[in-house]
Image: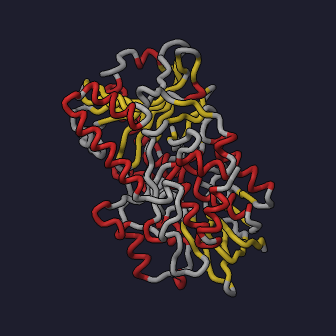
Amino acid sequence: MNRYDVIIIGSGLGSLLCGYILSKEGFSVCILEKHSVPGGCLQSFRRGENSFDTGIHYIGSMLPGQTLHSYWKYFGLSQSLELEQMNKDCFDLISLDGSEFKLAQGFDHFTETLAGQFPASREFLGQYVSALKETVSAFPLYNFQLTDKHTKTAWMGTINSAWRLSHGSTQITDHLIEYISAAGGRVVTGREVKKISSLKNKFQVETAGHEMFVAGRIIAGIHPRSAIGILEPSLLKRSFQSRILSMENTVSSFGLYLGLKPGSFPYLDYNLYYHATRDAWAGQECKTEQWPGMYFMYTPSGSRHGEFTSALCILSTMCFEEVKRWEGTSTGKRGPDYKKFKSGYAEKLLKLVERKFPEIRSSINDMEISTPLTWRDYTGTPEGSMYGIRKESGNYIKTMILPHTKIPGFYFTGQNLNMHGAPGVTIGAIMTCDEILGLEYLFNKIRDAE
């Protein structure tokens, strides 16, 4: 038997942060990952000479004293990551049917930049930014303060500062795994967990290869729907199971990962959100006839060659229903109809991109295409959901996933627990470890990190 204090299922950011915290506190930790490559949404992949990130394309609040920098200092990430700050005057460019709007870094700069385009709305923009600051102040953990258990959450703000990871998001994975391993923990890939059962006040974990692991505590860093699917039925209350299964997932994506001819396309030090109409929400989940209604474009930091880029990533939202007919298939075995589907939708997306970049086709050297099935298989999220469970602002309790469960010793972490994005998942991991270590003890350690 492989015996540990804590077994963590999945190796995404939330799982690795929990593994780091608990290893640092002397717990024996084992992280089990079903894929051959760890990291979940932190994974990067190479095509030719170019590297592309799977999920984290940019992060915010990484200047000293800002939220993510303050938390990640404890994990050694603030000191070790190689970052590129994005355009301070425009980190996000919003294009609505030909009209363009720049979002600048820093609350004051953000306000002044938009007020230059909307001078009559200067007062309203000031009120909007004040409302954002007030919202942030309502979430104490975001402000690096202790808080009551029922109000722990995080608000993400790239307006403060926006950054790209110079060598991709894999550097986060590598740093955290290096520390966990040095502290005596293990990160084991190629171990798909098929069953979690009770064993004399502990948990027994069985993998697809019939390897057994035992621990007193389990942290599920995978989607809650996937987690309850591997739990022994006797451990679950039917009401809890029904609640999890009833929750809707957020939308997935269709993506083009392009290798470009040298000197043919400019490097963009900002993200582009292009919408086909002036309704920014119309393209979020549009179906076949109207697709695509929008796209998100960025040039990976590592692809920069002077003023030009060697790679380009273009993503559009896509509902899982579009590829549902192939959901029982695996990568490389989906048949000619699936290849036809991918090439047809790639053509549709490129036509929309050509509205702003007419020269795009002549710049393409090679192209990789992803669908919601690709996202599902890479990250293990049901329906290829990009942001996990869809949260309901009008009834937050309905879609709230707490770190602790009514199964003693079984916990959740990851983007479904709190909010998606690096700050949300980071604070979610702290909330999970709070259940084991105590928040005041843990928070003081993080706050006092050198």
Percent of width and height locating residue 87? 47, 26
Between 175 and 140, the residue placed more toward the observer is 140
Percent of width and height locating residue 251? 37, 50
| Quadrant that contains the N terminus | bottom right
User: What residue occupies the far bottom of the structure in this picture?
Assistant: 200
Residue 345 sits in quarter: top left
Between 101 and 261, the residue placed more toward the observer is 101
* Residue 396 appears in the picture as rendered: yes
24 versus 397 height, above or below = above
Between 436 and 308, the residue placed more toward the observer is 436
Percent of width and height locating residue 278? 21, 33
370 versus 435 height, above or below = above
The structure residue drawn at horizontal position 66% and vertical position 52%, both measured from the top left corner, is 74
The colouring scheme, among rainbow, by chain, secondary structure or one colour, is secondary structure
Residue 349 sits in quarter: top left
User: What residue occupies the far top of the structure in this picture?
Assistant: 263
The structure residue drawn at horizontal position 66% and vertical position 47%, both measured from the top left corner, is 173
Q: Is 162 left, or right, of 400 in this rendering?
A: right
* Residue 416 appears in the picture as rendered: no
Q: Is 25 left, or right, of 442 in this rendering?
A: right
384 versus 121 height, above or below = below
Total numbered circles:
0
Q: Is 295 left, or right, of 3 in this rendering?
A: left
Percent of width and height locating residue 407? 55, 80
The structure residue drawn at horizontal position 41% and vertical position 52%, both measured from the top left corner, is 136
The structure residue drawn at horizontal position 59% and vertical position 72%, both measured from the top left corner, is 435
